[in-house]
Amino acid sequence: MGIQADYVRKIQGLLATAESLADQGNEEAAGAYVAKAHALQQKYSIDQAMLAEGEAPRAIIDRTWVMPGAYGRRKVNLAHVVAVHTGCAGYFARAEDGSYRFNVFGFTADVEWAETLFFSLCHQAEAALGFAVRGPYEHGRSFTTAFLEGFTQEVARRLREAAKEAKAAAAREHEASRTRNGRSVALVLADKAKRVEDELKARVGRLSTSRLSGSQSYSGYEQGRAAGRDASLARGSVHDGAAPSLPR
Protein backbone atom coordinates (compact mmCIF):
# COMPACT_ATOMS: atom_id res chain seq x y z
CA MET A 1 0.00 0.00 0.00
CA GLY A 2 2.93 2.30 0.73
CA ILE A 3 4.39 1.78 -2.76
CA GLN A 4 1.03 2.54 -4.37
CA ALA A 5 0.61 5.69 -2.29
CA ASP A 6 4.10 6.83 -3.26
CA TYR A 7 3.33 6.40 -6.96
CA VAL A 8 0.01 8.21 -6.63
CA ARG A 9 1.71 11.08 -4.80
CA LYS A 10 4.39 11.41 -7.49
CA ILE A 11 1.86 11.26 -10.33
CA GLN A 12 -0.35 13.87 -8.66
CA GLY A 13 2.69 16.09 -8.18
CA LEU A 14 3.62 15.88 -11.85
CA LEU A 15 0.05 16.65 -12.90
CA ALA A 16 -0.16 19.61 -10.53
CA THR A 17 3.04 21.02 -12.03
CA ALA A 18 1.68 20.44 -15.55
CA GLU A 19 -1.57 22.24 -14.70
CA SER A 20 0.32 25.18 -13.21
CA LEU A 21 2.52 25.48 -16.30
CA ALA A 22 -0.52 25.25 -18.60
CA ASP A 23 -2.26 28.01 -16.65
CA GLN A 24 0.84 30.14 -17.25
CA GLY A 25 0.59 29.49 -20.98
CA ASN A 26 3.58 27.17 -21.15
CA GLU A 27 1.86 24.29 -22.95
CA GLU A 28 5.08 22.66 -24.14
CA ALA A 29 6.50 22.29 -20.64
CA ALA A 30 3.08 21.21 -19.33
CA GLY A 31 2.94 18.49 -21.97
CA ALA A 32 6.35 17.22 -20.88
CA TYR A 33 5.18 16.84 -17.27
CA VAL A 34 1.97 15.11 -18.38
CA ALA A 35 4.05 12.68 -20.42
CA LYS A 36 6.16 11.96 -17.32
CA ALA A 37 3.01 11.31 -15.31
CA HIS A 38 1.72 8.86 -17.89
CA ALA A 39 5.09 7.09 -18.09
CA LEU A 40 5.13 6.78 -14.30
CA GLN A 41 1.65 5.25 -14.35
CA GLN A 42 2.86 2.78 -16.97
CA LYS A 43 5.90 1.96 -14.86
CA TYR A 44 3.68 1.37 -11.82
CA SER A 45 1.64 -1.12 -13.82
CA ILE A 46 4.82 -2.91 -14.91
CA ASP A 47 6.21 -2.99 -11.37
CA GLN A 48 2.96 -4.50 -10.12
CA ALA A 49 3.18 -7.22 -12.76
CA MET A 50 6.77 -8.00 -11.75
CA LEU A 51 5.90 -8.13 -8.05
CA ALA A 52 2.93 -10.42 -8.71
CA GLU A 53 5.06 -12.92 -10.64
CA GLY A 54 4.91 -16.29 -8.94
CA GLU A 55 1.92 -15.33 -6.80
CA ALA A 56 -1.73 -16.26 -7.21
CA PRO A 57 -3.09 -14.75 -10.46
CA ARG A 58 -4.88 -11.44 -10.03
CA ALA A 59 -8.42 -11.07 -11.28
CA ILE A 60 -9.16 -9.63 -14.70
CA ILE A 61 -12.18 -7.33 -14.86
CA ASP A 62 -14.27 -6.00 -17.72
CA ARG A 63 -16.21 -2.79 -18.17
CA THR A 64 -18.41 -1.36 -20.89
CA TRP A 65 -17.78 2.14 -22.17
CA VAL A 66 -20.64 3.83 -24.00
CA MET A 67 -19.21 6.16 -26.61
CA PRO A 68 -20.12 9.70 -25.54
CA GLY A 69 -21.64 12.20 -27.95
CA ALA A 70 -21.76 11.83 -31.71
CA TYR A 71 -19.43 9.93 -34.06
CA GLY A 72 -19.37 6.87 -31.82
CA ARG A 73 -17.73 4.63 -34.41
CA ARG A 74 -14.76 7.00 -34.66
CA LYS A 75 -14.48 7.15 -30.89
CA VAL A 76 -14.33 3.35 -30.82
CA ASN A 77 -10.94 3.70 -32.54
CA LEU A 78 -9.79 6.01 -29.76
CA ALA A 79 -11.06 3.53 -27.14
CA HIS A 80 -9.09 0.75 -28.83
CA VAL A 81 -5.91 2.86 -28.93
CA VAL A 82 -6.20 3.72 -25.23
CA ALA A 83 -6.91 0.11 -24.25
CA VAL A 84 -3.99 -1.33 -26.22
CA HIS A 85 -1.47 1.13 -24.82
CA THR A 86 -2.56 0.73 -21.20
CA GLY A 87 -2.24 -3.05 -21.06
CA CYS A 88 -5.89 -3.83 -21.81
CA ALA A 89 -7.85 -5.39 -24.66
CA GLY A 90 -11.39 -5.04 -25.90
CA TYR A 91 -13.97 -5.14 -28.65
CA PHE A 92 -16.85 -2.97 -29.78
CA ALA A 93 -20.50 -3.70 -30.48
CA ARG A 94 -23.53 -1.70 -31.51
CA ALA A 95 -26.51 -1.60 -29.19
CA GLU A 96 -30.16 -1.79 -30.26
CA ASP A 97 -30.49 1.98 -29.83
CA GLY A 98 -27.69 2.51 -32.35
CA SER A 99 -25.05 3.57 -29.82
CA TYR A 100 -21.55 2.12 -29.90
CA ARG A 101 -20.10 0.35 -26.89
CA PHE A 102 -16.55 -0.75 -26.19
CA ASN A 103 -16.00 -3.64 -23.78
CA VAL A 104 -12.57 -3.45 -22.18
CA PHE A 105 -10.75 -6.25 -20.33
CA GLY A 106 -7.70 -5.94 -18.09
CA PHE A 107 -6.31 -5.86 -14.58
CA THR A 108 -8.14 -3.46 -12.27
CA ALA A 109 -5.54 -0.67 -12.11
CA ASP A 110 -5.05 -0.74 -15.89
CA VAL A 111 -8.77 -0.65 -16.67
CA GLU A 112 -9.39 2.22 -14.26
CA TRP A 113 -6.51 4.23 -15.73
CA ALA A 114 -7.68 3.48 -19.29
CA GLU A 115 -11.24 4.50 -18.48
CA THR A 116 -10.21 7.82 -16.96
CA LEU A 117 -7.90 8.52 -19.89
CA PHE A 118 -10.42 7.59 -22.58
CA PHE A 119 -13.26 9.78 -21.35
CA SER A 120 -10.80 12.60 -20.69
CA LEU A 121 -9.57 12.40 -24.29
CA CYS A 122 -13.12 12.30 -25.69
CA HIS A 123 -13.93 15.47 -23.78
CA GLN A 124 -10.75 17.16 -24.99
CA ALA A 125 -11.33 16.12 -28.61
CA GLU A 126 -14.84 17.55 -28.60
CA ALA A 127 -13.68 20.78 -26.95
CA ALA A 128 -10.83 21.20 -29.45
CA LEU A 129 -13.17 20.43 -32.35
CA GLY A 130 -15.31 23.38 -31.27
CA PHE A 131 -12.36 25.68 -32.02
CA ALA A 132 -11.32 24.03 -35.30
CA VAL A 133 -11.71 26.02 -38.50
CA ARG A 134 -13.53 24.34 -41.39
CA GLY A 135 -13.07 25.69 -44.90
CA PRO A 136 -16.08 27.09 -46.80
CA TYR A 137 -16.24 24.11 -49.18
CA GLU A 138 -15.60 21.33 -46.67
CA HIS A 139 -18.42 18.99 -45.71
CA GLY A 140 -19.02 19.07 -41.96
CA ARG A 141 -19.13 15.30 -41.45
CA SER A 142 -15.99 14.68 -43.52
CA PHE A 143 -14.16 17.39 -41.60
CA THR A 144 -15.18 15.99 -38.20
CA THR A 145 -14.32 12.38 -39.00
CA ALA A 146 -10.93 13.50 -40.35
CA PHE A 147 -10.34 15.58 -37.22
CA LEU A 148 -11.09 12.62 -34.94
CA GLU A 149 -8.87 10.36 -37.05
CA GLY A 150 -5.95 12.77 -36.79
CA PHE A 151 -6.53 13.21 -33.06
CA THR A 152 -6.59 9.45 -32.49
CA GLN A 153 -3.46 8.78 -34.53
CA GLU A 154 -1.47 11.43 -32.69
CA VAL A 155 -2.64 10.17 -29.29
CA ALA A 156 -1.67 6.64 -30.37
CA ARG A 157 1.84 7.82 -31.23
CA ARG A 158 2.27 9.54 -27.88
CA LEU A 159 0.92 6.60 -25.88
CA ARG A 160 3.13 4.19 -27.84
CA GLU A 161 6.23 6.27 -27.06
CA ALA A 162 5.30 6.58 -23.37
CA ALA A 163 4.75 2.83 -23.07
CA LYS A 164 8.06 2.12 -24.81
CA GLU A 165 9.94 4.46 -22.46
CA ALA A 166 8.26 2.95 -19.40
CA LYS A 167 9.15 -0.60 -20.47
CA ALA A 168 12.77 0.39 -21.11
CA ALA A 169 13.04 2.08 -17.71
CA ALA A 170 11.49 -0.91 -15.95
CA ALA A 171 13.79 -3.30 -17.79
CA ARG A 172 16.87 -1.37 -16.66
CA GLU A 173 15.63 -1.25 -13.08
CA HIS A 174 14.72 -4.93 -12.86
CA GLU A 175 17.69 -6.29 -14.82
CA ALA A 176 19.87 -6.58 -11.72
CA SER A 177 17.13 -8.27 -9.70
CA ARG A 178 14.93 -10.33 -11.97
CA THR A 179 11.78 -12.13 -10.85
CA ARG A 180 12.03 -15.17 -8.63
CA ASN A 181 12.27 -17.53 -11.60
CA GLY A 182 14.69 -15.24 -13.44
CA ARG A 183 12.25 -13.96 -16.06
CA SER A 184 12.67 -10.62 -17.78
CA VAL A 185 10.28 -7.68 -17.88
CA ALA A 186 9.46 -8.49 -21.52
CA LEU A 187 8.41 -12.05 -20.70
CA VAL A 188 6.35 -11.01 -17.69
CA LEU A 189 4.52 -8.37 -19.74
CA ALA A 190 3.97 -10.84 -22.59
CA ASP A 191 2.36 -13.27 -20.13
CA LYS A 192 0.25 -10.47 -18.69
CA ALA A 193 -0.99 -9.48 -22.16
CA LYS A 194 -1.74 -13.11 -22.99
CA ARG A 195 -3.82 -13.53 -19.83
CA VAL A 196 -5.91 -10.52 -20.79
CA GLU A 197 -6.39 -11.74 -24.37
CA ASP A 198 -7.22 -15.28 -23.22
CA GLU A 199 -9.83 -13.93 -20.80
CA LEU A 200 -11.43 -11.87 -23.56
CA LYS A 201 -11.55 -14.88 -25.91
CA ALA A 202 -12.92 -17.15 -23.19
CA ARG A 203 -15.80 -14.79 -22.47
CA VAL A 204 -16.53 -13.53 -25.97
CA GLY A 205 -15.25 -16.13 -28.42
CA ARG A 206 -14.21 -15.39 -31.97
CA LEU A 207 -14.26 -11.72 -32.98
CA SER A 208 -14.42 -10.22 -36.45
CA THR A 209 -12.49 -7.15 -37.57
CA SER A 210 -13.83 -3.93 -39.04
CA ARG A 211 -12.12 -1.10 -40.91
CA LEU A 212 -13.07 2.52 -41.40
CA SER A 213 -12.52 4.49 -44.57
CA GLY A 214 -9.72 7.06 -44.54
CA SER A 215 -10.18 10.76 -43.86
CA GLN A 216 -11.51 13.04 -46.61
CA SER A 217 -10.39 16.38 -45.19
CA TYR A 218 -6.69 17.21 -45.00
CA SER A 219 -7.39 20.33 -42.94
CA GLY A 220 -9.55 18.42 -40.48
CA TYR A 221 -6.96 15.66 -40.15
CA GLU A 222 -4.09 18.09 -39.50
CA GLN A 223 -6.07 20.11 -36.98
CA GLY A 224 -7.00 16.86 -35.23
CA ARG A 225 -3.34 15.86 -35.08
CA ALA A 226 -2.46 19.23 -33.56
CA ALA A 227 -5.17 18.78 -30.92
CA GLY A 228 -3.86 15.27 -30.22
CA ARG A 229 -0.37 16.65 -29.67
CA ASP A 230 -1.70 19.15 -27.13
CA ALA A 231 -4.10 16.77 -25.38
CA SER A 232 -3.44 15.88 -21.77
CA LEU A 233 -2.83 12.17 -21.36
CA ALA A 234 -3.92 12.14 -17.75
CA ARG A 235 -6.66 14.60 -16.93
CA GLY A 236 -9.56 16.00 -18.85
CA SER A 237 -10.30 19.52 -19.79
CA VAL A 238 -9.30 22.36 -22.01
CA HIS A 239 -7.96 24.91 -19.55
CA ASP A 240 -10.57 27.57 -18.74
CA GLY A 241 -12.31 26.91 -22.05
CA ALA A 242 -9.43 28.51 -23.90
CA ALA A 243 -8.91 27.64 -27.53
CA PRO A 244 -6.27 24.98 -28.11
CA SER A 245 -3.39 25.78 -30.42
CA LEU A 246 -4.60 24.72 -33.86
CA PRO A 247 -3.11 25.44 -37.30
CA ARG A 248 -5.04 27.91 -39.37
Image (cartoon, grey):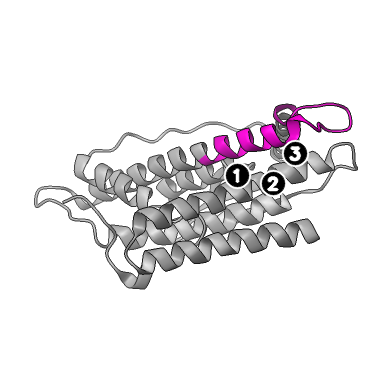
Q: Which mark is residue 86?
A: 1
x and y percent of residue 71 in the render? 38, 52
Image quarter for residue 196?
Answer: top right
| Of the image marks 1 and 2, the number of the one nearer the N terminus | 2
**In the image, which residues are magenta?**
162-187
Query: Taking 21 as reference, is 223 above or below it?
Result: above
Q: Is residue 143 left or right of residue 210?
A: left
Of residues 163 and 5, the one nearer the viewer is 5
Residue ID at (90%, 43%): 56
Q: Residue furthest left?
A: 136
Of residues 153 and 202, the one nearer the viewer is 153
Residue mark closest to the camera, 3 vs 2 = 2
3D distance between C-alphas at marks 3 and 2: 19 Å
Q: Residue furthest bottom?
A: 240
Instruction: Say if mark 1 contacts mark 2, CB within 8 Å.
Output: yes
Q: Amino acid at mark 2?
A: Ser
Local SS, label 2: helix
The crowd level at tag 2 (other Cα within 10 Å; few <14, some 14-19, many 20+) is: some
- In this figure, what is the number of numbered marks? 3
Instruction: Say if mark 3 contacts mark 1, CB within 8 Å.
Output: no
Query: Taking 28 as reference, is 12 above or below it?
Result: below
Magenta highlight on residue 164: yes
Local SS, label 3: helix
Residue ID at (32%, 64%): 25
x and y percent of residue 124 in the render? 40, 60
Q: Which residue is mark 3?
A: 199
Q: Amino acid at mark 1?
A: Thr
Magenta highlight on residue 6: no
Provide the major secondary structure of the magenta segment.
helix
| Of the image marks 3 and 2, the number of the one nearer the N terminus | 2
Local SS, label 1: loop
3D distance between C-alphas at marks 1 and 2: 9 Å
